[in-house]
Amino acid sequence: MLTSRLFFIFLFTISLSLLSFGFYLEHVKELETCPLCAFQRFSYIAISVLALIGSIHNPIGLFRITYNILLIVFALIGVAIAGRQTWLQHLPSELVPECGPGLEYMLEVFPFGQALKMILSGSGECAEIQWQFIGLSIPEWSLICFSSITIAAILAIFMLKPERKLFKF
């Protein structure tokens, strides 16, 4: 039987594996990381950290629901970002926005709110398809993964039973 703790361990393992694969593509295959990809990584990092804390804490009751709601929020942020990048990749070439300044430059020069708006609107570099597997690009796979995490967290709220704790504290 799948328990809350096992669910969080599984989710931590999956999200950490996805992050590791992203770093592999960046550092070994030398693919450029666009600003939208970087923000997708932040969502995966938030999900990983939350899942790790959830597996250690093994929450019950309202805490278990709270952890899953936070997972849903982070996964939906990832869905929005990956969806935006997927949309950019499917635009006709004449409608793709021009490439903008780099992520580090935007964060250093512009106020945070303006930099965030520029980053999330995407640019030409975010529309490039650098890698595909079974005909799907990185943001398309990411969209599938974030959507799956969202669905799993929703199901976990209603279907998973918490483990009984030996000690109450």
Image (cartoon, helix red, strand yellow):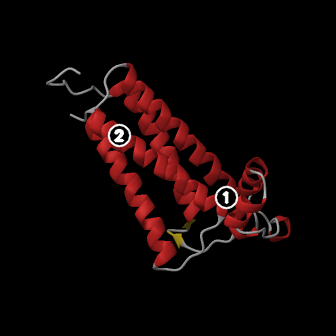
Examine the rendered structure and indicate whether residue 155 appears above or below residue 85. Answer: above
Left or right: 29, with 116 as reference point: left
Left or right: 143, with 149 as reference point: right
| Residue 3 picture location, percent across and down | 25, 33
Secondary-structure class at tag 1: helix
Left or right: 102, with 49 as reference point: right
Nearest to the eye among marks 2 and 1: give it: 2
Number of residues whose C-alpha sits closer than 10 Å to that of mark 2, classed few (under 14), some (14–19) or many (20 or more): some
The residue drawn where x is 48% and y is 76% is 27
Image quadrant for the C terminus? top left
Number of residues whose C-alpha sits closer than 10 Å to that of mark 1, classed few (under 14), some (14–19) or many (20 or more): many
Seen from this angle, which residue lies furthest left?
166
Q: CA distance from mark 2 to mark 1?
A: 29 Å
Observer-nearest residue: 81 or 136?
81
Looking at the picture, which amino acid does disc 1 mark? Gln
Residue carrying label 1: 85
Looking at the picture, which amino acid does disc 2 mark? Ile
Q: Earlier in the sequence, mark 2 or mark 1?
A: 2
Image quadrant for the N terminus? top left
Secondary-structure class at tag 2: helix
Examine the rendered structure and indicate whether residue 142 appears above or below residue 169. Answer: below
| Residue 153 picture location, percent across and down | 43, 35
Q: Is residue 36 visible?
A: yes
Residue carrying label 2: 53
| Residue 74 picture location, percent across and down | 53, 41
Left or right: 135, with 15 as reference point: right
Q: Is residue 90 visible?
A: no
Examine the rendered structure and indicate whether residue 31 appears above or below residue 119. Answer: below
| Residue 16 picture location, percent across and down | 39, 56
The residue drawn where x is 47% and y is 51% is 45
On the image, which quarter does residue 52 sit in? top left
